[in-house]
Image: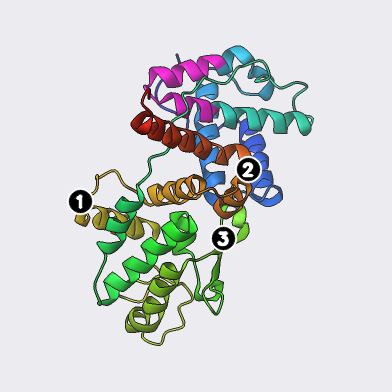
Amino acid sequence: MPPAEPPSALPPAFASGLSDFLDTMRVEAGLARRTTRAYAGDLGRFLRWSARSGSATWSDVDPRAIVEYLAWRRAEGVAETTVARNLVSVRMLMRFLVLEGVLDKDPTALIPAPVLRRLLPRMLTPDDVERLLEASGGDDWIALRDRALLEVLYACGARISEAVSLRTGDLEPELRVLRLHGKGDKMRIVPMGGRAREAVERWLAIGRPEVARARPVPELFLTARGRPLDRTNAWRRVKRAALRAGLRAEISPHTLRHSFATHLIEGGADLRAVQEMLGHVSIRTTEVYTHLDTEHIRSIHRLYHPRG
């Protein structure tokens, strides 16, 4: 195995190819900055490992080297999901290099993806959601903001990054729908229920003016200093509400997104409609919630059927 310390710089061929790939992903494929940074991290680690192993050109990167790299990652103790993600990143890069004529063939073509156990996302029951939302009750500006934030996360299935980047201009005048800007800056329109509308209206009318102080800040959710609420602080507000509600500590903003989708499916919503509201590119990503629905049906059968 190569030594632990990475070199200060990649070989020129690696540095150039990686830069071209990331530029293409960002500019032509329209990937979000966070996704592009994730690719950069995964691939930078792989290429530094390859350089320490003696590779300096793309032709040096063969299937055996890639398999050895994945084995090295496992030996480091990373999760199998991380190993799978690393392989996807390397596969994307190699396919790009083939398309660009740098490589004649893809060295990852015959490498199978790790077999992953499909984990169902954590979710809350409707009663849990009610307790969580009620935990932010109050009339001060913090309580009004937190209630509006929680309502948007649950009522609209928004990612936390989408919620904190919401601007007042993303709200339809009657607050029946809002515009969410998702991955790759793709915009989608999602309806808001009556209770979410009420919470957002109260925040806009009473809470937000108190901290905005007439300054032209476009973001919907603000801090005490009138600045946009960031992802980290929004995550903390959800955790605090969960603790106040007496719910388990591992609840996160994404738990509300999963609960939104699950409750829609259990209520009979069309899978394609849920896909659109979640902003999933592929229906396969949304299909996990049909497994959750099946578990729900099976639990009812076990409870009520005499031979359950």
Q: Earlier in the sequence, mark 3 or mark 1?
A: 3
Query: For this rendering, which residue is in front, 2 or 205?
Result: 205
**Label disc, if present, on residue 22 of the rendered structure:** 2
**Label disc, if present, on residue 181 of the rendered structure:** 3
* Residue extent of the magenta highlight: 67-86
Residue type for callout 1 = Gly
Q: Secondary structure at mark 1?
A: loop
Residue type for callout 2 = Leu
Residue type for callout 3 = His
Q: Residue at x 24, y 73 (%)?
A: 138
Q: Secondary structure at mark 3?
A: strand
Q: Which corner quadrant holds the C terminus? A: top left
Query: For this rendering, which residue is in front, 130 or 237?
Result: 130
- Magenta stretch, main secondary structure, is helix
Is the residue marked by circle 3 packed among few (<14), some (14-19), or many (20+) residues within 10 Å?
A: many
- Per the image, the residue denoted by label 1 is 246
Query: Does 51 lie within the magenta span?
Result: no
Question: Residue 129 is drawn in which quadrant?
Answer: bottom left
Per the model, the C-alpha gap separating discs 3 and 1 is: 32 Å
Task: Report if residue 287 is visible in the image.
Answer: yes
Residue 237 horizontal/vertical position (percent): 29, 59
